[in-house]
Amino acid sequence: MYNRLRELREDKDMTQVQVAKYLNMSQTGYCQYEIGKNDIPTVILIKLSMLYNVSVDYILNITNEMTPYKRA
């Protein structure tokens, strides 16, 4: 389900360690999101969508449209 997390991270030439640091968490904890072992909390989804400049729907594989919604 979260294959896009890995793709987005690799497209930005970032490591799991770098993303985990941005999210203020451990690399192991972040890895659990990428492999789909743990559900991603809403706060983390929002931070990831901002980091990658994509919609949360794109991260969750609901849409193929990467463009984020206009922010409030």
Image (cartoon, helix red, strand yellow):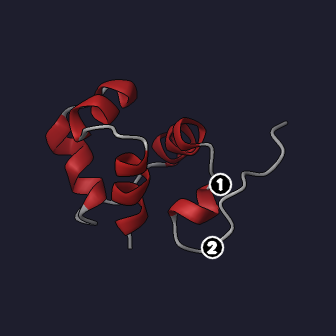
Check the image and report above or below for 33 versus 25.
below
Of 5 and 32, nearer the camera is 5
Quarter containing the N terminus: bottom left
Residue 9 placement (x, y as % from top left): 38, 47
- Could you classify mark 1 by the number of other residues whose Cα lies within 10 Å: few (under 14), some (14-19), or many (20 or more)? many
Of 55 and 45, nearer the camera is 55
Residue type of the residue flagged with mark 2: Asn
Q: Residue at x 38, y 59 (%)?
A: 7
Q: In the drawing, does residue 47 fall left or right of residue 2?
A: right
Dot 2 or dot 1, earlier in sequence: 1
Residue 49 appears in the picture as rendered: yes
Residue 51 placement (x, y as % from top left): 53, 36
Tell me the distance, in whole angstroms, between the alpha carbons under discs 2 and 1.
Answer: 10 Å
Q: Name the residue under label 2.
A: 64
Check the image and report above or below for 14 versus 54.
above
- Could you classify mark 2 by the number of other residues whose Cα lies within 10 Å: few (under 14), some (14-19), or many (20 or more)? few
Q: In the drawing, does residue 26 fall left or right of residue 14?
A: left
Q: Which residue lies furthest to the left in this view?
A: 28
Residue 2 appears in the picture as rendered: no
Residue 15, quarter of the rendered image: top left
Quarter containing the C terminus: top right
Q: Which of marks 2 and 1 is in front?
A: 2
Tell whether label 1 touches label 2 (CB within 8 Å). no
Q: Residue at x 42, y 49 (%)?
A: 11
Label number found at residue 55:
1
Q: Residue at x 40, y 54 (%)?
A: 40
